Image: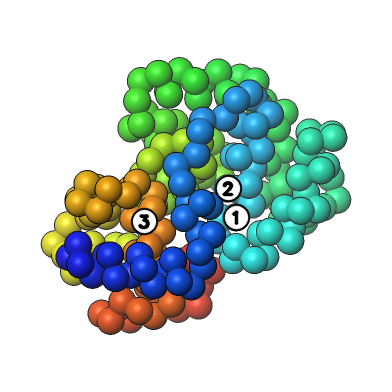
Amino acid sequence: MTLDEYLTYREMVRELDPEAFKRVRTKLPPTDATDFALRVSYVILNSGMRWTVTQDIWSRMKPSLVDTGEVGETFGHPGKRKAINLVMSNRSGLFEKFKSAWALGPEKVVEYCETLPYVGGITKYHLAKNLGIDTAKPDVWLERVAANSGEAVQELCARLSQLAGDSVSTVDYVIWKACQQGWWPLVASPSDDPKNE
């Protein structure tokens, strides 16, 4: 993808959703163990689900997590429920490990994310972004765009980030949105599999 193509897509995204760039800014790192555990829990919940479905469930789940430290009756997926409850009950120790990884740099945070329950090789990038790391999530669409440019996802997003003056997270979102909307002309839309969101 060229810089001109990226800038065109960025403007199309801005016209489609003027608030999008506020939402995809690189986040500050979590401030305490509960903030950390809630961010991890959200990513676990979101894994393999459409954003709109996740928002509905999260609006019911978050109060229970804050009040009791458990999912409660708000969500029935056994694997995710167990993982979220585990993160919430061990949040102090997990947060300390996160802080140690943070002190060692972004790559160590990404590596640490994959050690958490229900967080895999792609989801670790989503989680790292939610924990304050400026990185790209190499989902199927970004992989296709990067391959078309002869680059890896992180290389593509870093290059366009430097050229456009946008964060890597912003570049990731613009490319993902261009594909999701069917704007990128060379993408053959992946199946409606929610894991590709």
Question: How far apart in space, not on screen, are marks 3 and 2 (Cα)?
Answer: 17 Å
For disc 1, the marked residue is: 46
In percent of width and height, residue 40 lies at 59, 39
- Residue 128 located left or right of residue 186: right
Type of residue at label 3?
Asp
- How busy is the neighbourhood of tag 2: few (under 14 within 10 Å), some, or many (20 plus)? many
Residue 43 circle label: 2
Dot 1: element: helix
Q: Which element is circle 2 on? A: helix
Return the disc, 3 or 2, that comes first in the chain's sequence: 2
Distance, label 1 to label 3, CA atoms, is: 17 Å
Q: Amino acid at mark 1?
A: Asn
Q: Nearer the viewer, residue 159 or 62?
A: 159
Comparing labels 3 and 2, the label whose residue is closer to the camera: 3
Cβ atoms at labels 1 and 2 below 8 Å apart: yes
Residue sitting at the far left: 150
* Mark linked to residue 172: 3
Q: Is residue 48 left or right of residue 167?
A: right
Q: Nearer the viewer, residue 24 or 75?
A: 24
- Residue type marked 2: Val
Q: Residue at (42%, 45%) from the top-left corner? A: 125
